[in-house]
Amino acid sequence: MSDETNNEGLNEAPWRATILTLYPDMFPGPLGTSLAGRALENGLWSLDILHIRDFAEGKHRNVDDTPAGGGAGMVLRPDVVGRAIDAATGEGDMRPRILLSPRGKSLTQEKVRSLKEAGGAILLCGRFEGVDQRVIDGRNLEEISIGDYILSGGELGAMVLMDAVVRLLPGVMGKVASGEDESFESGLLEYPHYTRPTIWEGHEIPEILASGHHGKIAQWRHEQAVALTKERRPDLYEAWEAEE
């Protein structure tokens, strides 16, 4: 995939991300480089960072407390998080409010496309044992997970989500087709790719790819995508087959 950008979409309202985090120095991180970074510089999307601790009160500005009922770890306080969310949300702001959480629904390409169409998102990066359930309910937070594993906090998950969305924005990728052919866009995993040299360590590029017959090449790629999906992700294959 090319790292090119173009000027398409420069006149559209930028996709707006607001991050609520205890570690603002982590951003933009990798989002400040390559496609996402150039798109940020070109105004195709915007990134605002709010430090959750700025909304804490008292001498020690505590953002967490022990869990009610006992147990290990600490929990982010609802009053502090609630004030942070309220500060991030302007009048008429209808952007989705997302909590990155391992107990959330899995992030999918379908969800990524819907967030792209939403015009932005407010992303709360969880820490410690979690966030008080009252602020999750009271501020209508949608919990999203990037996988079945545990991270130290939601910051990396927020970066993954934003990278997935930003690359779909008009003007970010040089060629629209480069996004349309990728894994999950069609419900299948992506077909194998090859390039020069034609022969490498005794292995040749599949002959069909040098035939110049675009119809046969497309058919071969589709068959490869189907076979790979069936082998590696039977869950995706079954869903795709059911829609055919």
Image (cartoon, rainbow, N blue to C red):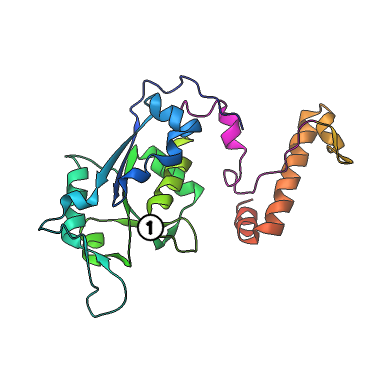
For label 1, the crowd category at 10 Å Cα-Cα, with few meaning under 14, some 14 to 19 and many 20 or more, is many
Residue 220 is left or right of residue 33, and the answer is: right
What residue did someone put label 1 on? Answer: 153
> Which quarter of the picture shows residue 38?
top left
The residue positioned 20% from the left and 63% from the top of the image is 77
Q: What x and y, as percent, mark residue 138? A: 20, 59
In the image, what residue type sits under mark 1?
A: Gly
Residue 122 shows in this picture: no
Above/below status of 36 relative to 73: above
For the stretch drawn in magenta, what is the main secondary structure?
loop
Q: Residue furthest right?
A: 202
Q: Does the magenta run of residues contain 183? A: yes
Residue 28 is left or right of residue 74, and the answer is: right
Residue 37 is left or right of residue 218, and the answer is: left
Of 161 and 153, nearer the camera is 153
Residue 73 shows in this picture: yes
Q: What x and y, as percent, mark residue 131? A: 28, 63
